[in-house]
Image: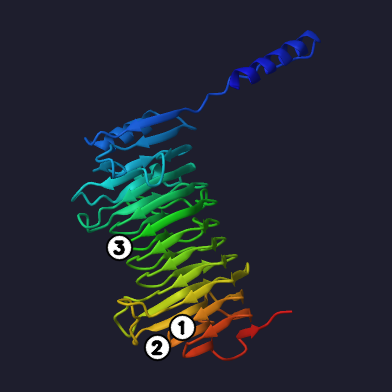
Amino acid sequence: MHKSVFTLVSATVLALAATGIAVIAQPTPAEAARKEVQCTGTDDATIINNAITASKAGDEIVILGRSVTAAEPAVCVINKTIVLRGDRTYRGDSRTGLRIKQADSVNLPALLASDTWDANQAYSGNPIRVERLTLDGNRAKNTTGTVGLMLRSWGSRISDIQIEQTSSDAIRLSNPSKNGTTIDSATNTMVNGVISDVYITGSGGAGVKVLDPDGGVITDWTFTRSWVRDSGTSAVESDNAAGWLLSDLHLYGNASSALDLNRCFGTSIQGNYIEDFGYQATTAEAWLYGIRCVVQEGATTTISNNKIHNFRDAGKTPPTGPHYYYIALDGVDSGAGNVVVTGNAILGNGTADQTGLQYEKKSGASLTVVSTGNLVKNVTKPLVKVPNDTTVTVNAGL
């Protein structure tokens, strides 16, 4: 195909030249290459990292694991972090066909990580794509600090992967680098990424963590069509949810909250199924959320068509002491927050101190909520406004 197109273009150039029309010759574009990397069971991390170092922008790095038995997927066992350069695709041949597993007792900071995180740069990396593989944190033999996928690259695409048994977060989008260097927000951001069709299970921390303590850097991402179960903290914890779309997620069995989101600004939360959040709470001072948004002034946030349930599953019965909020909005920063909450279905389990909808001004000047068409059942308090005065307005819209 390449040769045929180039021949056609060359013929056109010659024809134009024959008419006297000036033609500027175009260089032949560099072709991206598929580079296969074969793990051997001996220092697989070095083999993979060397192949990445030797690659060029546009390349697809296909990682081939070492087959242990016919009944098990091919595996690469790593004792160093795999550093992902930008403008490249990283994949296995299938999600169930390649397992990248942390070796025993190495407690890596991350299994895979963006290059600018590893190199402590003050900017985000170029886009990467990671797909069609499984990351195994080997949590039983690595008990502290391992993140599955450490992202510090804008415009990235993460799809069709499984992440399991990490001692820390399964996926972390991180403004701070390895040594704590932050992205210079005056000149750089980390935006416009997509995480989709991902299955996360058994992480010691959050399923997805957005670490952006200074704010304004990690915005406008999409997290969709994915499953997060049995996380040690929350399914999704975010310092910065501005411009994010969180949709069509199934979040279940997570020890703390399901969606715990700061800086909601033009945020869309829609079509998610949440169940059995907060089941590991043991103290009466715990606050646990199905969906929590700390609302900033400005662009309206929408929360629609979510199903939030808390059943009494065997072994995961929520205790009666903590405070459960199925949808909670907190105003912030002396501003006027605006949120639409519509078409959500909330089903509690009848234990004490459960609130279906809580709209609280907190440090904001006011909070206006269009709240309509929500089903709220089997909770102690269906709707609470705090304070119950004109600074918190709840209406059905037009």
In this rendering, the label closer to the viewer, 3 or 1: 1
180, above or below 43, in the image: below
Q: Which residue is tagged 1?
A: 348
The quadrant holding residue 99 is top left
- Real-space Cα separation, disc 2 to disc 3, in angstroms: 27 Å
Mark 1 near mark 2, Cβ–Cβ under 8 Å? yes
Q: CA distance from mark 3 to mark 1?
A: 26 Å
Horizontal arrangement in the rendering, residue 326 relative to residue 20 (left or right): left
Residue linked to disc 3: 204
**Secondary structure under the numbered disc 2 in the rendered image:** loop
Q: Closer to the camera, 199 or 244?
A: 199
Kindly indicate the quadrant of the structure image that contains residue 166: bottom left
Indicate the amino acid at tag 3.
Gly
> The C terminus appears in which quarter of the rendering?
bottom right
Residue 66 shows up from this direction: yes
Point out residue 313 in the picture as x, y percentages from the top left corner. Answer: 36, 77
Pick the front one: 66 or 235: 66
Nearer the observer, disc 2 or disc 3? 2
Residue at mark 1 to residue at mark 2: CA–CA distance: 8 Å
- Classify 370 as above or below 243: below
Q: Nearer the viewer, residue 99 or 366?
A: 99
Farthest-out residue, top:
18
Above-or-below relation of 79 to 293: above
N-terminal-most mark, 3 or 1: 3
Q: Mark 2 belongs to which amino acid?
A: Thr
Asked if residue 181 shows in the view, the reply is no
Residue that carries the numbered disc 2 in the rendered image: 351
Q: Residue at x 32, y 61 (%)?
A: 202
Tell me the crowding category of disc 2: few under 14, some 14 to 19, or many 20 or more residues within 10 angstroms, Cα based.
some
